[in-house]
Image (cartoon, helix red, strand yellow):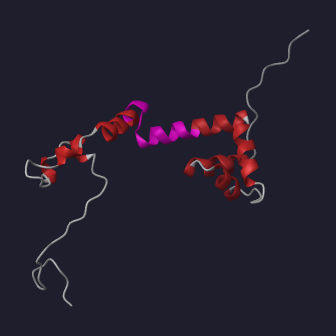
Amino acid sequence: MTKPALTGPRPLTPKQQRFVAEYLKDLNATQAAIRAGYSEKTANEQGARLLAKASVREAVTEGQARQLVAAGLTAVDTKEAIRRQVCGDVRRLFDEHGSVRPIHTLSAEDAALIAAFEVVIKNAAVGDGHTEGA
């Protein structure tokens, strides 16, 4: 007597494929279920149920791997970026007088600590090329 062949996860339905694509956008199962066409009333349960399916989980894992490859990221790169943020010392952005060091003098690691910056021009006058006329 021959044993039945082992089969892998079942192929996804088009709606499940859409769920996976939507889930990969923001990792929000409820919203992904809604965007994929599942009922808003049951989206929370549907999202959880879909993620519990081996075939859907496998598709999500493969999709995430593709996203990392496309972004040129590896787990090592990601961990290193997190390490820089956690272990970075913001004091290195300033000189001994407390003034911000010129951006071009910062190392890549120090510059990575900056999430945003704002330039304020003081004592600017109309017509100086730094402000717009009234």
Looking at the image, residue 4 sits to the left or right of residue 122; the answer is right
Q: Nearer the viewer, residue 65 or 99?
A: 99
Magenta: main secondary structure = helix
Residue at the farthest front position: 97
Residue at the farthest bottom position: 134
Q: Tell whether position 69 is magenta.
A: yes
Taking 77 as reference, is 7 above or below it? above
Residue 84, quarter of the rendered image: top left
Taking 71 as reference, is 9 above or below it? above
- For the point 66% across and 36% down, the residue is 57
Residue at the farthest right position: 1
- For the point 41% across and 37% down, the residue is 73
Q: Tell whether position 105 is magenta.
A: no
- For the point 58% across and 36% down, the residue is 62
Looking at the image, residue 120 sits to the left or right of residue 80; the answer is left
Q: Position of residue 111 (x, y in %)?
A: 23, 47
Q: Position of residue 100 (x, y in %)?
A: 14, 54
Q: Which residues are magenta?
A: 63-77
The quadrant the N terminus occupies is: top right
Q: Position of residue 15 (x, y in %)?
A: 73, 50
The quadrant the C terminus occupies is: bottom left
- For the point 29% across and 57% down, the residue is 116
Q: Nearer the viewer, residue 8 or 61?
A: 61
Q: How many labels, in total?
A: 0
